[in-house]
Amino acid sequence: MYRAFALLLSFAAVVAQPPAQSPYGVAVTGKLIPPKPLNWPDPDGSDCKYRGSFTTSFSVTVTVNGIGKNIKMTKSSGNKCLDKQALKAAPLQTWRPATRDGKPEEYTFTYDITFQN
């Protein structure tokens, strides 16, 4: 029962979101396919002392050319050394750009880099 309730809330949140806006203030419609990673750079956490799993979250805007820009850490892992390594790796990520009705468009979202040992 709990799982079904959680899925219902997630679906309601998606439906309740307003349509995207163009730079001219006009609602944008059409099928949106979000960006997909083309490569996952391997952040080097070997110089850091940690035990377990640590996740750093980032906000990124993927351009129509698949390049990340405006990359910002939105949530620290709690380990400054691992955060520094994640900040080095995040700009190396390349993406397949988001598309709307088959045309590439800029897209901003958040994603995670997780260190585990």
Image (cartoon, grey):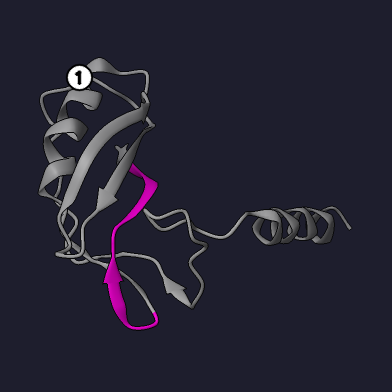
Q: How many marks?
A: 1
Up-down relation of residue 49 to residue 34 (above or below): above
Label 1 CA crowd tier, 10 Å (few <14, some 14–19, many 20+):
some
Q: What type of secondary structure mainly makes up the magenta span?
A: strand
Residue drawn at point x = 19 percent, y = 66 percent: 38
Residue drawn at point x = 32 percent, y = 64 percent: 35
Q: Quadrant of residue 56?
A: top left
Instruction: Give the position of the N terminus as an image quadrant.
Output: bottom right
Q: Position of residue 106 (x, y in %)?
A: 29, 58
Residue that badge 1 annotates: 81
Residue drawn at point x = 36 percent, y = 53 percent: 23
What amino acid type should be assigned to the residue bearing mark 1?
Cys
Q: Is residue 107 left or right of residue 93?
A: right
Q: Position of residue 2 (x, y in %)?
A: 84, 52
Instruction: Give the position of the C terminus as an image quadrant.
Output: top left
Q: Position of residue 59 (x, y in %)?
A: 34, 39
Up-down relation of residue 94 to residue 91 (above or below): below
Up-down relation of residue 50 to residue 53 (above or below): above
Taking depth in this image into account, of 87 and 69 the one nearest to the observer is 69
Q: Is residue 2 left or right of residue 88?
A: right
- State yes or no: residue 24 in magenta: no
Mark 1 lies on a secondary structure that is helix
Q: Position of residue 96 (x, y in %)?
A: 23, 69
User: Which contiguous range is marked in magenta?
Assistant: 101-113
Taking depth in this image into account, of 77 and 37 the one nearest to the observer is 37
